[in-house]
Amino acid sequence: VTLFRRARIYTPLDTGRPAAGPAQGRIESWDGGALLVRDGRIAAVGEESEVLGALGAADRRAVQEVDCGGRCMIPGFVDPHTHLCFVVPREREFLARIEGADYLSILRDGGGIHATVESVRASTEEDLYAATRDRALSALRLGTTTVEIKSGYGLSLDSELKQLRVIARVGRETPLSVVPTLLAAHAVPAEYSGRADAYVEHVAAVVIPRVAEEGLAAYCDVFCERGVFSVPHTERILLAARNAGLGCRLHADELDEGGGAALAGRLRVASADHLLAATDAGLRAMADGGVIAVLLPITAFTLRRPYARARAMVDLGLPVAIATDCNAGSACVESMGFAFGLAVLQMGLSVAETLTAVTLNAAYALGLGDTVGCLAPGRPADLLVLHGESPGILAFRAGVSVVDEVYKAGVRV
Ligand code: NIG
Ligand code: FE
């Protein structure tokens, strides 16, 4: 039994569905808050006097106290979109882009994602695991307690399976909760060059059934983008995935408008991610389809593109979540705190809306909205103690980590 005292607690409230519109900014807070943990789960949370009332006689003998000294407590971050499973970041490509090279042209010329695919294919499972684990542990230190990790740097049956085994092992051997996503349709691999249709068929008919049979993925994702995978390709793959029992999500309208958001709405997928170039019609289709918008401000920042229209999305009634997109090329920062800062300072979201975006709505995007993402009785005690008085400190000091302490299921990690 652990009792956190003298905390300024801020948490979204779970109403049984993703927080949309005005609800996205509704946050509960207690200035003189306390939180009681029993067997790794939250037993009580609220004003200290009320929580003390919930302490039984047996609890009183066993209790360990943590004095938060007036610091802020929030739920652990849920990062619902990462590509953490790779060996080395493409630093030279970054320098070339700073000098003016274009992300999609590099990809078309066989660099970009293809360069990472070569190194992931060549690496042993053990080396890939070590690199992925280290990156995941860095995210954990920065406050992420639940993380989605995609494959997509293998692009062959064997290498995608290798990545997914590594991702599963990160879930078993680190304190993080990991949600695995199959992203075999991340690029058309070199051996299928000029034969995108054939690769899509291979993914739908061979890769998806095998991955589903081995239970290695919860979701399937597609990079739906002009010049990568078309809307019909994306639909073919996602329907095969759904048929195999996987959840569906997609990279939509990241660089150009290409009908991704509209498709997401029509297929009623769990989330459509990026959306830098999404149109109002696309966003409305998402709202109608109950799709969560997962925004990735670090990618816009790194690619020096205009940010997604987060304000318009919240006003349209779309539930918005925020993720890092941490990957080898377009954005290589595993810090949800930094994404938080960009959301507040560059995308016009309020601190309260952003807190919901990095916790509860992110959890809903992963199908975990009833499990993690808020501080409520019965949920695992995944929580952060921040070096500040409110979640606003994450934006105010976005360039450094203000995460003082990370607890996973009540245990300090
Ligand atoms: O979300 N856009 C596709 N996938 C990643 C980038 C992957 C990479 O550049 O290696 C993204 O931005
Ligand atoms: Fe991505």
Image (tube, grey):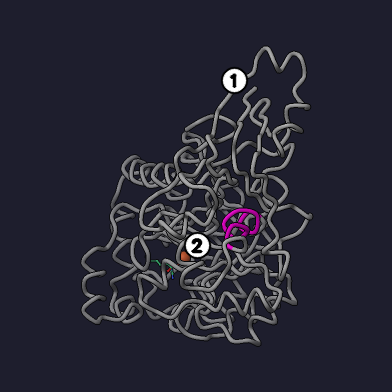
Read off the residue under disc 2: 183
Q: Residue at x 36, y 79 (%)?
A: 104
Where does the image place residue 40, in percent across and percent down from the top left?
64, 29
Residue at x 41%, y 69% (from the top left corner): 299
Q: Is mark 2 within 8 Å of ligand 1?
A: yes
Above or below, 8 against 110 in this view is above
Instruction: Specify the quadrant that holds the N terminus.
Output: top right
Residue situated in front as seen by the camera: 153 or 53: 53
Q: Amino acid at mark 2?
A: Leu
Q: Position of residue 61 (x, y in %)?
A: 68, 12
- Percent position of residue 331, x then y: 37, 65
- The amino acid sitting under disc 1 is Gln
> Magenta includes 356?
yes
Residue that label 1 marks: 64
Residue segment shown in magenta: 354-363
Name the residue nearer the viewer: 269 or 306. 306
- Asked whether residue 235 is drawn in magenta, I would say no
Q: Residue at x 60, y 66 (%)?
A: 249
Tag 2 or tag 1, which sits nearer the N-term?
1
> Looking at the image, is 219 positioned above or below residue 46?
below
Looking at the picture, does residue 305 appear above or below residue 206? Answer: below
